[in-house]
Image (cartoon, rainbow, N blue to C red):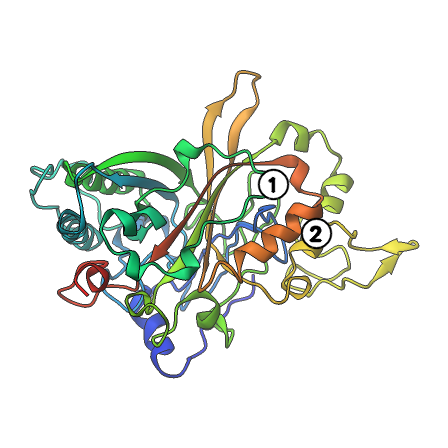
Amino acid sequence: MTQHTPEKTPGKSETSLEAGVSRRRLLGTASAAGVAGLALGGAGGAYAHAATREEPPAALTTLGSGSVPFHGVHQAGITTPAQAHGHLVAFDLAPGAGRKEAAALLRRWSDAARRMMAGEPVQGGQGGGADSGIALDAGPSSLTVTFGFGRTFFGRTGLKGGLPRELAPLPEFSADALDKKRSNGDLWIQVGADDALVAFHALRALQRAAGKAAKLRWQMNGFNRSPGATSHPMTVRNLMGQVDGTNNPKPSEKDFFKKVFVPEDGSPEWMAGGSYVVLRRIRMLLDDWDERSLDEQEEVIGRRKSDGAPLSGGKEHTEPDLEKRAKGKLAIAANAHIRVAAPETNGDAAMLRRPFSFHDGFRDDGAPDAGLLFLAWQADPLRGFVPVQRKLDRGDALSPFLRHEASALFAVPGGPREGEYVGQRLLEG
């Protein structure tokens, strides 16, 4: 896969990349998912692995040494390379808990996250107690903890005046079959790490630190390819076996930060340097997909399965030729996923896709309960996720093989400065 060197972006955007990402790996294995149809594989395709490294990937024996800063212009876990293990969890504030209790909770969570991301044990606190010791002997393992606020959080804390317009409820889509119990929430946490015990330790510590201030709403577990599993950095494959995430935005692009992050002079002020994340739990109908021939699968996606090259010709990173015809028909079908999801067919709508795959066992009919925990990061979901999902909803060849079963949207504030906790500018502003 082509190596990209992040382009220096003038002003504060430049600082944002340097402050928020480990210098050892910049967007190294960021997986990405396509939108709604859930982009699996292409020009708006899902599950991306943008390989942007400043040096070759670390050997497996050094996995534990990787660390990501807690403080910075942006929160960790957005442009950080996607880790091998992930946990997504949402909480609702307890009845009677308000702004004061929320602020105390975010202080506890931020302190615990800062310590664990540095490879240090957590300290006791409300509902916490002593460190469990789950991660003893392990290094930070590129642990990141990312926090976000749901729309309902602002009403519960008396902060409706700070509610961003971008946090408007997502529209309904015709293919949705959403479980409300596994959707939305007041508070959201993303945990990622390259070691399973380190990831679980962080999840458990944060859940204990919630104490009586918040109760668990839902939790999802995901995974990616482990760093060092391939001989060289390359785009990952999703559970359909498709090379997926080729066209994910890259920090070398001049408008990368504009598309992904709220500008320093944006509104509301507390969201400066932040981003909005759309979460979709998308179950793949893998039994149906695996029954299709290779030719059928490639026509649905619009790319060769072997190497991810567009059916219009070239290599994986060759720009798809949407006008090319072969044997009297379009080389890339009119409803092929990469055509429908392509930014050029969606008013240049784009988002940074950084998902995890999931497998939660097998259903009663024997089919795997597996698919994609789709995570799309953008400065404005009304201009990023929503228009692309609407287009996919109207006619994407991939949609019959997907089921959208949970959905959420969260405002993820900018990274905390030294001495701050996440969300302090909102809760104490």
Residue 12, can we see it? yes
Closer to the camera, 354 or 37? 37
Whole-percent x and y of residue 308? 65, 53
x and y, in percent, of residue 332 in the image: 78, 54
Write down the residue under mark 2: 303
Under mark 1, the amino acid is: Gly
Position of 323 with respect to 185 (left or right) is right
Identify the residue at horizontal 25%, vertical 56% (top origin): 159
- The front one of 307 and 383 is 383
Quadrant of residue 91 within the rendered picture? top left
Q: Which of marks 1 and 2 precedes in the sequence?
A: 1
Q: Position of residue 168 (x, y in %)?
A: 44, 54
**Mark 2 vs 1: CB contact within 8 A:** no
Residue drawn at x 34%, y 79% as measured from the top left: 12
The residue that disc 1 covers is 241
x%, y% of residue 388? 60, 55
Q: Quadrant of the C terminus?
A: bottom left
How packed is label 1: few (under 14 Cα within 10 Å), some, or many (20 or more)?
Answer: few
- Identity of the residue drawn at 72% across and 51% down: 302
Residue 312 is left or right of residue 53, and the answer is right
Q: Residue at x 20, y 36 (%)?
A: 95
Instruction: Please name the amino acid that badge 2 sits on.
Output: Arg
Total number of numbered discs in the rendering: 2
Mark 2 lies on a secondary structure that is loop
